[in-house]
Image: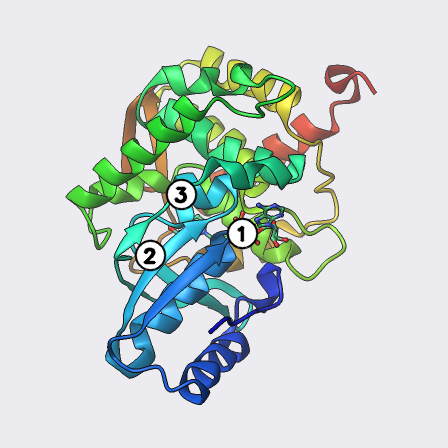
Amino acid sequence: MRIVIPAGERHKNIETVQYIWSQLIENQADRKSLLINVGGGMVTDIGGFAASCYQRGIDFVNIPTTLLGMIDASIGGKTGIDFQGLKNQIGVFAQPLAVLILFEFLATLPKRELLSGLAEIIKYGFIVDKEFLGAHLSATPTNPINHTWILKAIESKDEITSKDTNETGLRKILNFGHTIGHAIETYLIDTQKNITHGEGVALGMVSALYLSEKYLNLDHQITLYYKEIYRQNFNRIDLNDVPVEKLLEIMRHDKKNQGGDIRFVLIEDYGKPVYDVVVKPEDIVDSITYLIDYLNDADYWGK
Ligand SMILES: NC(=O)c1ccc[n+]([C@@H]2O[C@H](COP(=O)([O-])OP(=O)(O)OC[C@H]3O[C@@H](n4cnc5c(N)ncnc54)[C@H](O)[C@@H]3O)[C@@H](O)[C@H]2O)c1
């Protein structure tokens, strides 16, 4: 049987899960049934969640069709849905039986979605190895991203998540750029300025590098280098109307926090991440202002 759900983050919710469950019941799915999730990260997140709760858990297989899904969302066992305006607020850790990577799917993927995945690959340049920063140079007219980089990113994610499945320590490094990136993505979900997950991360990394300089003495040249990579690859997004206080409020709900503090993954150098860094709210505000000033700098962007 086939279950079709509407595309888009705003459908990653409990109503869609209920629809999946009702379809499973209607088609007499039992504990031996297998749910095969074919789609982007939205589908593998929600499908994995629906499967892991149905009759206390049935097997599922992920077949990611987006770059972000291949290198990130489909592996590592995080499943879930958004709830009451909060991203991935409800979910469980559940491993797929298998993940099938079929590069052919990338042929139809819009450029913006490819860039969303590229942002997550570039992230590994900061938390694993500088060489990942070169991934954006591998594109050719027929091949938007060299498959070697995709495989390397998958290996890195798999290695990190298999050492810390439930995110009690090491796995947190994968959230580099996500604290502010997620907040911006969450705030914009229902606005005309909806951004992709990777666009949020790409933006969040500018702020995370600013904070890394302030808290861990990161070399400013690294921030300048990334800002150049950002300018060459990602969209200049207008964040002037985004209320910073609202972003702070969203960050306070972040699942990675404890005891009311807002915690970040920052870096000391390429490949040297530090997680659970408590950052003062006023410094978070400064880092968002830094990001907005960067995006507003007409001379730098040449327009
Ligand atoms: N579980 C995790 O560890 C994890 C990690 C990162 C992101 N995520 C989640 O992943 C989601 C984002 O995933 P995404 O970026 O893949 O977005 P997505 O699943 O929303 O897909 C983006 C768009 O691309 C379309 N699409 C999918 N495959 C296509 C193809 N081959 N050709 C043409 N169009 C195609 C979809 O219909 C959709 O419109 C978010 O919900 C995010 O929270 C989860």
- When asked about the image quadrant of residue 52, the answer is bottom left
Number of dots carrying numbers: 3
Q: The residue under label 1 is which amino acid type?
A: Ala
Precedes in sequence: disc 1 or disc 3:
3
Identify the residue at horizontal 46%, vertical 74% (top origin).
1
Identify the residue at horizontal 59%, vertical 54% (top origin).
245
Q: Is residue 149 above or below residue 27?
A: above
Q: Is residue 47 above or below residue 40?
A: below
Identify the residue at horizontal 60%, vertical 30% (top origin).
290
Label 2 element class:
strand
Give the labeled residue for mark 3: 72
> Image check: 168 left or right of 16?
left
Tell me the CA gap for discs 3 and 2: 10 Å
Q: Where residue 183 is drawn, which disc sits there?
A: 1
Q: Where residue 191 is drawn, which disc sits there?
A: none
Tell me the CA gap for discs 1 and 3: 19 Å
Identify the residue at horizontal 38%, vertical 28% (top origin).
124
Give the labeled residue for mark 2: 78
Dot 1 crowding, Cα within 10 Å, few <14, some 14–19, many 20+: many
Precedes in sequence: disc 2 or disc 1:
2
Label 3 element class:
helix
Mark 2: C-beta under 8 Å from nearest atom of ligand 1 = yes
How far across and down, in percent of the image, does residue 187 sit?
62, 56
Near-viewer residue (76 or 291): 76
Judging from the image, the colouring scheme is rainbow
